[in-house]
Amino acid sequence: MERIHTLAIQQTCDIGFISKVEEASGQHISKCYQCGNCTASCAYTHVYDYPVNQIMRLVQLGQKKAVLQSRSIWLCATCQACTTRCPNNLDVARIMETLRIMSRQENMVAERDIELFYHEFLESIKAFGRVFETGLLPMFSLKAGKPFTDMDLAPRVLKKGKLAFLPQRIKGRKQVAAIFHRFEAHQLKRTEELRQAGLTQPVEGDSHPDECE
Ligand code: SF4
Ligand code: SF4
C-alpha cells in the first residue's frame, strides 16, 4: 500500500473547514497538539491511508478534500479507544463520525461498499426494528456487485442456528420506523429550503487558497 502522501497544503487549504468540523462535532479540534496517543491506541492504523492523529492535523490545516476523501474515516470502527486516551479530552471517534457525515454530504466517499453497508444496515432496522442479518447480507452483496462473497459460509452458519430465517417481530417496530420517517421528512424539508434559498451543495474540490497563505 502507498503510505507516503505529499500535499500542497497552501493550494488545497479551505480555512473554514476546521470551524465547520468543530461546529458539527462539538469538539475543539484546534486543541490537538499531535501527541499521537489516538494513533497509538487505534487498531486500524495499519489499514488507514492517514493515521487518526494526521486526520486531526489535516482538519487543522483545512485539508478538506484529503480528509473527506480519505479511506481512514470509513475504516474507523468507532471503538472509541482514541477518545479514551486523548489528553485533551477530544472525542476523536465523534470527530471521525462527523467527517463521515460530511463526506457523504459532499459526495466524497472513498469507500463506497462501507457506505452501502451503513445504508443497508439502517434500511434493515427501519423495516424490522432490528437488524435482520439473513436479509441484510445477501442484499448488501448483491448491491455491491459481489453476490457470491461468503456464500459458502451460509450453510454452515444456518446449520448452527446463528442466523434466523425470518425477521423477529420486536415490540416498538412502528416507533422505530417513525424515527426514520421523521428524519426523512426533515431532510426533504431542509433540501427544499436550500433549493428555495438558491443554495447548492458545496462542490468537490471547493477551496479558498488565498485564505491559507
Ligand atoms: S490523542 Fe488527542 S491531542 Fe493527541 S494527537 Fe490524538 S487528538 Fe491530538
Ligand atoms: S474510534 Fe476509530 S480512529 Fe478511534 S481508535 Fe477506534 S477505530 Fe481508531
Image: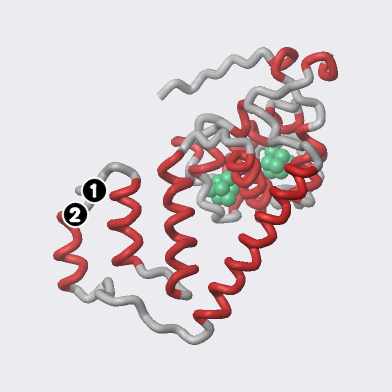
Q: At label 2, which amino acid type do we have?
A: Met
From the viewer's side, name the closer residue of 195 and 152.
Answer: 195
Q: At label 1, which amino acid type do we have?
A: Pro
> Picture coordinates of residue 174 (x, y %)?
53, 80
Residue at 61%, 71% in the rendered image: 179
> Picture coordinates of residue 177 (x, y %)?
54, 73
Does the residue at mark 2 contact the one at mark 1 (Cβ under 8 Å)? yes
Residue that numbered label 1 is attached to: 147
Q: Is residue 166 visible?
A: yes
Q: Is residue 164 above or below residue 124?
A: below
Q: Is mark 2 within 8 Å of ligand 2?
A: no
Determine whether the residue tagged by mark 1 lies in a helix, strand or loop. loop
Residue that numbered label 2 is attached to: 151
Residue furthest toward the front? Answer: 196
In terms of image quarters, where does ligand 1 lie? Answer: top right
**Quadrant assignment for the C terminus:** top right
> Picture coordinates of residue 75 (x, y %)?
49, 43
Q: From the viewer's perspective, is the residue at label 2 or at label 1 nearer?
A: 1
